[in-house]
Image (cartoon, grey):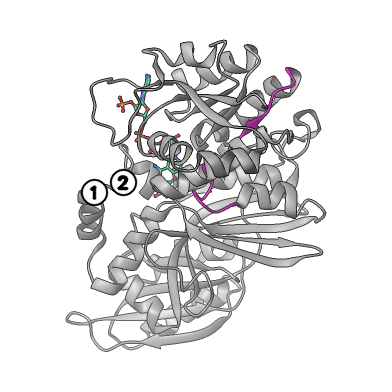
């Protein structure tokens, strides 16, 4: 009988326990599909006494993840601890040096140190697989590195943080302000230990940087992602955007232009009836555009025990089958340094202005937009909001971010605004 593929798992939290459960539940199925049995030999976490809702008695317990990473009876090291430094990185490097392949779900680590890890793994003839690192259960990494490998990718975009999508859709459906829904999300356990990773757009930015590298053959470049979180999205904007036929999403977009690689993660408007606009709750969606295939839309659970462990298992089976791919889909030494470019691709914009309700106010606004070279597509003025002030919505024709910045700076000088103007990009999807 073929020898089993022996797994060592560091991290027995949401994802780690999910992997243990699949290995136990589907032993026969995994053996048939992998061509050999898949067996866990050693595990590690911080607290051995914690109740983990799974029987771990058959596995050797190691206090130190490094012992799992370097154990003689481990073929594949599964890193599910998390964090972009410390034990996660150290144990992966130790495992590679000890001749193990590595599976991880750690998007932060790959976004920050992906190139160095890929170079190390490939120089040692080892693989690192990370399907679970982007969009949880959605098979986006394999889609890009395998199924779409014959395409020149032109654009990748998506909603890749379920917590932010939950907050934004819940604000709209319940009519609640950001702060109230943020608190709900915290109570439901949706937020990362450091919530700014979610609502600050950083977690989603990590994922976008990883996808960019695969899509465009560039070294992963998280520092070049323009990131804005959802903290400034108000219930007013969600309602007004809906009035104009849009929904607000924390949307990541990566594309190459003549100026370089644009990567941005920011709240954007998308048409309410588009696939991205229809995405509710904690679900993720990734849209990939290739020169031959056209547009592909992948949708599914972006987090949670089952979906994330499902993705980890797909990597384990790939290794068991003997499939050995470069970390980012092409040899790390062939990945070029990204030429980062600030967003310059023109787009339509949504603007919400709170104006003094007096003669000439609208004319002054129109003059500023005209001076900035911005053409108005649609404009809507609502009835008085508070004494003597009116909300005015503007949807522009396509214009540049530079022109919008110019207008946003000039608008307060009209003397007719009662609060800071709000502007959001409308992404074509
Ligand atoms: P988690 O529930 O917080 O679990 C982390 C595990 O790591 C725990 O078992 C913890 O031990 C263990 N650990 C922490 N520090 C350790 C140390 N120094 N030595 C040994 N063990 C240590 O995290 P998770 O949600 O499973 O996430 C794991 C990874 O998957 C992260 O990289 C995360 O970004 C990624 N990911 C998660 C999801 C998701 O839905 N949760 C989705 C996609 C990707 P104790 O249990 O003893 O505290
Ligand atoms: N915090 C992440 C999310 C978990 O909300 O999508 C999955 O990466």
Residue at 26% from the left image edge and 89% from the top image edge: 383
Left or right position of 321 against 24: right
Q: Position of residue 421 (x, y in %)?
A: 38, 67
Residue at 48% from the left image edge and 56% from the top image edge: 266
Q: How crowded is mark 2: few (under 14 residues within 10 Å), some or many (20 or more)?
A: many
Q: Is residue 36 above or below residue 265?
A: above
In which image quadrant can residue 219 be found?
Answer: top right
Q: Where is residue 118 in the image (x, y as percent from the top left)?
A: 68, 27
Q: Is mark 2 within 8 Å of ligand 2?
A: yes
Q: Which of 389 and 169 is in front in this view?
A: 169
Q: Is residue 206 above or below residue 60?
A: below
Q: Give the range drawn in magenta.
A: 124-139
Q: Please, what secondary structure does the residue beneath circle 1 have? A: helix
Q: Are marks 1 and 2 in contact (CB under 8 Å)?
A: yes
Q: Position of residue 155 (x, y in %)?
A: 68, 58
Q: Please, what secondary structure does the residue beneath circle 2 have? A: loop
Whichever of labels 1 and 2 marks the residue nearer the N terminus, that label is: 1
Q: In this view, does 417 lie above or below 63?
A: below
What secondary structure characterizes most of the magenta part? loop
Cα–Cα gap, marks 1 and 2: 6 Å
Left or right position of 358 against 412: left
Q: Name the residue under label 1.
A: 186
Q: Where is residue 140 in the image (x, y as percent from the top left)?
A: 61, 52
Q: Mark 2 points at which residue?
A: 191
């Amino acid at each position: 009988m073929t020898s089993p593929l022996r797994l060592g798992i560091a991290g027995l939290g949401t994802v780690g326990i999910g992997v243990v459960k699949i290995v136990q539940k589907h032993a026969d199925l995994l053996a048939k599909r992998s061509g050999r049995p898949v067996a866990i030999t050693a595990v590690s976490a911080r607290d051995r006494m914690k109740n983990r809702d799974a029987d771990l008695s058959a596995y050797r317990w190691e206090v130190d993840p490094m012992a799992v990473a370097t154990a003689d009876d481990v073929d594949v090291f599964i890193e599910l601890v998390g964090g972009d430094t410390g034990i996660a990185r150290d144990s992966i490097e130790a495992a590679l040096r000890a001749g193990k392949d590595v599976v991880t779900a750690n998007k932060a680590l790959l976004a920050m140190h992906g190139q160095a890890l890929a170079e190390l793994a490939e120089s040692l003839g080892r693989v690192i697989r990370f399907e679970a690192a982007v969009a949880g259960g959605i098979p986006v990494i394999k889609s890009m590195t395998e199924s779409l490998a014959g395409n020149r990718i032109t654009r990748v975009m998506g909603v890749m943080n379920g917590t932010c999508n939950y907050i934004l859709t819940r604000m709209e459906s319940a009519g609640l302000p950001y702060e109230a829904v943020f608190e709900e999300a915290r109570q439901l356990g949706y937020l990362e230990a450091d919530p700014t990773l979610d609502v600050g757009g950083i977690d989603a930015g990590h994922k976008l940087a990883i996808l960019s590298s695969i899509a465009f053959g560039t070294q992963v470049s998280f520092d070049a992602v323009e990131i804005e979180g959802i903290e400034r999205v108000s219930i007013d904007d969600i309602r007004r955007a809906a009035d104009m036929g849009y929904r607000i999403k924390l949307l990541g977009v990566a594309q190459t232009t003549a100026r370089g690689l644009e990567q941005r993660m920011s709240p954007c408007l998308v048409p309410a009836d588009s696939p991205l606009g229809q995405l509710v709750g904690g679900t993720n969606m990734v849209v990939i555009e290739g020169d031959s295939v056209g547009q592909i839309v992948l949708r599914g659970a972006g987090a949670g025990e089952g979906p994330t462990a499902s993705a980890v298992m797909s990597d384990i089976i790939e290794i068991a089958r003997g499939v050995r791919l470069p970390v980012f889909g092409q040899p790390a030494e062939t990945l070029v340094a990204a030429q980062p470019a600030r967003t310059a691709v023109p787009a339509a914009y949504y603007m919400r202005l709170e104006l003094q309700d007096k003669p000439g106010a609208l004319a002054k606004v129109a003059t500023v937009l005209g001076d900035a070279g911005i053409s108005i597509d649609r404009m809507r003025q609502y009835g008085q909001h508070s004494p003597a002030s009116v909300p005015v919505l503007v949807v522009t024709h396509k214009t540049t971010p530079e022109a919008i910045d110019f207008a946003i700076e000039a608008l307060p000088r009209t003397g007719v605004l009662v609060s800071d103007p709000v502007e959001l990009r409308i992404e074509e999807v």
